[in-house]
């Protein structure tokens, strides 16, 4: 007895076998992993539900408004103390400068004119305080890292760039005047170091602005500089590093010290968000995690639903029709 298999039956069996292999591959390489993640999400959901139930039982007799009010009485004093202490960390008006007019100027030439004007005023003060210009750096602009006309002409000059360079120059000039007022015998070199913006060690609340200085000064004036100009200042100053040499020990004169030091100032950076919102974020830190976990679970369900619908469509339109 011969058994004859029709061509349609062979196609049906082949399609069924290929479909089975296809979905077996999808399950093995994709769905198995997704289902495992889904089981983890289910376990996490149960843990969150248990924790929520425990919180509901613990705080069932608590008035939310009373709880929030008590919490704020603890946060606000700390916030006010932070704001009071923050006043000590500022750079005063050291970065103030003329701003460019909105029209009627060629920006790069206006910038050069203002920079030269500021530098001229500085060297006039050098002459008054020291009497000689050779006791002060000859190219203070390069020492402070401020662009000259040739350098800025090669760039796409903007008002923001001009304001940034003039603020940098003004800040450096104020530091020079600060040293000149401290009776320095000579200022051999002064270098503006790159600022440390939002230092992580201070919770990103402080930015530091530093200068490297090489100078000569008498022992008496240096002690006055440290004690009165820096330690008793109404804002933050610090000497981060210092090296003192006294090569004239055999001379019967007032000690004239050769000093190399790094001087820093700090500026307070207010948080971008209100402090209460930050504390609320810390207290509710688990909320974003719950949202991400819920989103991952929803994505898994959507993927599983997509493949289920695909399988139903395939059975209805492909398998049954043959």
Image (tube, grey):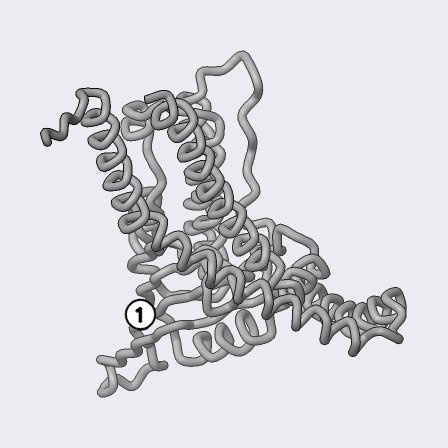
Q: In front: 132, or 196?
A: 196
Residue 193 left/right relative to 275: left
Outermost residue on the top side: it is 104
How many numbered marks, from 0 up? Answer: 1
User: In terms of image quadrants, where is residue 136?
Assistant: bottom left
Q: In front: 239, or 260?
A: 239
| Position of 83 relative to 25 (above/below) | below
Q: In front: 242, or 67?
A: 67
Q: In front: 208, or 122?
A: 208
Q: Residue at x 72, y 61 (%)?
A: 276
Residue 108 left/right relative to 100: left
Residue 31 left/right relative to 268: left
The C terminus - image quarter: top left
Q: Position of residue 147 (x, y in %)?
A: 33, 36
Q: Please, what secondary structure does the residue beneath circle 1 have?
A: strand
Q: Which residue is mark 1?
A: 260
Q: Position of residue 299 (x, y in %)?
A: 49, 45
Q: Residue at x 19, y 27 (%)?
A: 10
User: In terms of image quadrants, where is residue 274?
Assistant: bottom right
Residue 242 visible in the displayed image: yes
User: In terms of image quadrants, where is residue 212?
Assistant: bottom left
Q: Position of residue 295 (x, y in %)?
A: 54, 49
| Position of 174 relative to 19 (above/below) | below
Q: Residue at x 42, y 50 (%)?
A: 127
Residue 120 visible in the displayed image: no
Within-10-Å neighbours for mark 1: few <14, some 14–19, many 20+: some
Q: Residue at x 31, y 26 (%)?
A: 155
The N terminus - image quarter: top left
Q: Position of residue 240 (x, y in %)?
A: 40, 72
Outermost residue on the front side: it is 1
């Amino acid at each position: 007895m011969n058994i004859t298999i029709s061509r349609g039956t062979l196609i049906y069996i082949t399609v069924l076998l290929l479909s089975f292999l296809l979905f077996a591959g999808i399950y093995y390489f994709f769905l198995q992993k997704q289902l495992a993640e889904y089981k983890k999400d289910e376990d996490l959901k149960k843990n969150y539900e248990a924790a929520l139930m425990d919180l509901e039982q613990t705080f069932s007799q608590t008035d939310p408004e009373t709880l929030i009010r008590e919490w704020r009485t603890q946060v606000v004093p700390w916030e006010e103390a932070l704001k009071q202490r923050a006043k000590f960390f500022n750079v005063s008006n050291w970065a103030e400068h003329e701003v460019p007019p909105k029209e009627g100027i060629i920006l790069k030439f206006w910038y050069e004119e203002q920079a030269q004007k500021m530098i001229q005023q500085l060297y006039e003060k050098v002459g008054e305080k020291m009497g000689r210009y050779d006791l002060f750096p000859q190219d203070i602009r390069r020492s402070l890292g401020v662009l000259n006309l040739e350098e800025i002409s090669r760039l796409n000059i903007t008002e923001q760039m001009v304001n940034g360079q003039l603020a940098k120059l003004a800040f450096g000039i104020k530091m020079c005047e600060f040293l000149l007022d401290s009776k320095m015998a000579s200022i051999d070199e002064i270098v503006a170091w790159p600022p440390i913006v939002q230092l992580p060690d201070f919770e990103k609340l402080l930015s530091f602005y530093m200068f490297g200085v090489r100078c000569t000064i008498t022992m008496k004036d240096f002690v006055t500089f440290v004690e009165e100009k820096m330690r008793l200042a109404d804002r933050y100053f610090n000497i981060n590093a210092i090296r003192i040499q006294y090569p004239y020990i055999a001379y019967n004169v007032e000690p004239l010290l050769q000093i190399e030091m790094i001087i820093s100032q700090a500026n307070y950076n207010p948080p971008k968000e209100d402090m209460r919102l930050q504390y609320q974020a810390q207290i509710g830190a688990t909320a974003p995690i719950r949202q991400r976990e819920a989103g991952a679970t929803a994505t898994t369900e959507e993927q599983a639903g997509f493949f289920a619908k695909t399988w139903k469509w395939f059975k209805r339109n492909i398998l049954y029709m043959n």
